[in-house]
Amino acid sequence: MAGVLAPRVVVAHRPTEWDLLLERHATPGQVRFFLDSRGTGTDDVLDRHRRQTDALQAVEAAIPPPWRRSRVGRADLARFLFEPDDIVVAVGQDGLVPNLAKYLTDQPVIGINPDPDRYEGTLVRFQADDIANLLHDTYTQQARVEGRTMVEACLDDGQTLVALNELYVGHRSHQSARYVIAAGEATEHQSSSGLIIATGTGASGWARSIATERHTALPLPQPTSRRVVFFVREAWPSVDTGTGLTEGLLERDDHLTVLSEMDDGVCFGDGIESDRLSIGWGQTVTIGVADRQLRLVTS
């Protein structure tokens, strides 16, 4: 139909180690000198760079010529304007997908693993050779798309933040976080190393580490289940602070609230501290299952 825009494919990536070393040392010769002087050499770094570059080139070569295309680096995601009908292709490690997720609404994401020998591929489960068929099936809505649960924090001034793996709430530095936590009918004044609220996707990472260390019987959620789990880290027992409300499950309509007693509290998602909510003394952050989901192409 005349006037209808062609589909657009947005290829997202992150800089390789070689890219970062070039940015720091300016020339390939200086990079080689730097690595050789430390007994590392360039072979592995260049091999990883080559695999990433080859995967990016293969993906872009497979995009049908009439379609529109764009490439965006991880550092520019916050400034990039995604269109509602974009097909997003993430080329890189699994962690690139959570980096993307907070900036998307309903756009489907195809994860391409450029180096299956090094990257597990939980979220980037395809190789570059698969992309042509995946683009066709995604555009024609024949692809299988899995809705991955996300977690959302809402500050009492209207600011919000979503994450695919987990949110962290605590002090901006390594000081103890002081706050009042409430879940359901339970409430407690606490001092701790902060708390995390994790989805089923994030349950294989930080949340699992905490759950394993404390030998909890709390069941961790599945990636598509509409629930999240919270853990308080190293709660400190004192005459004024307790340790009775340190973990729990939040169903779809449940909420956890944290009333800050910190001048420099923060909430950030998926390990990206630069994109955060600043929580001052007396502010409340409310956390629960997000309405939106990541739409991950699985076949």
Image (cartoon, rainbow, N blue to C red):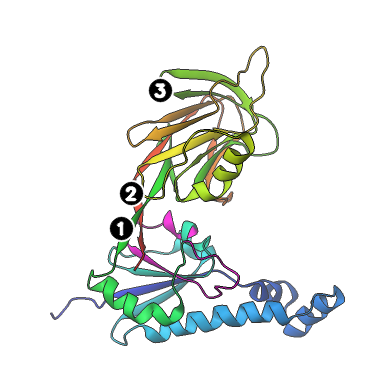
> Tag 1, which secondary structure?
loop
* Residue at position x 43%, y 43% in the image: 221
**Residue identified by numbered label 2:** 292
Q: Nearer the viewer, mark 1 or mark 3?
A: 3
Specify few, some or many for label 2: CA neighbours under 10 Å numbering under 14, 14-19, or 20 or more: some
Whether residue 197 is in magenta: the answer is no
**CA distance for labels 1 and 2:** 8 Å
Mark 3: amino acid: Gly
**Residue identified by numbered label 1:** 106
Whether residue 119 is in magenta: the answer is yes
236 shown above or below 295 = above
Q: Verify CB contact (< 8 Å) between mark 1 and mark 2.
A: yes
Mark 2: amino acid: Arg
* Residue at position x 59%, y 73% in the image: 117
> Tag 3, which secondary structure?
loop
19 shown above or below 199 = below
7 shown above or below 238 = below
**Residue identified by numbered label 3:** 184
Q: Verify CB contact (< 8 Å) between mark 3 and mark 2.
A: no
Characterize the magenta stretch by its predominant secondary structure: loop
Q: Which quadrant of the figure has residue 238?
A: top right
**Residue range highlighted in magenta:** 99-122
261 shown above or below 93 = above
> Tag 2, which secondary structure?
strand
- Locate residue 167 relative to residue 149 in the image: left or right: right
Q: Position of residue 103 (x, y in %)?
A: 41, 57
Specify few, some or many for label 1: CA neighbours under 10 Å numbering under 14, 14-19, or 20 or more: some
Q: Position of residue 182 (x, y in %)?
A: 47, 23
Residues 18 and 118: in front is 118
Q: Position of residue 137 (x, y in %)?
A: 27, 74
Residue 286, can we see it? no
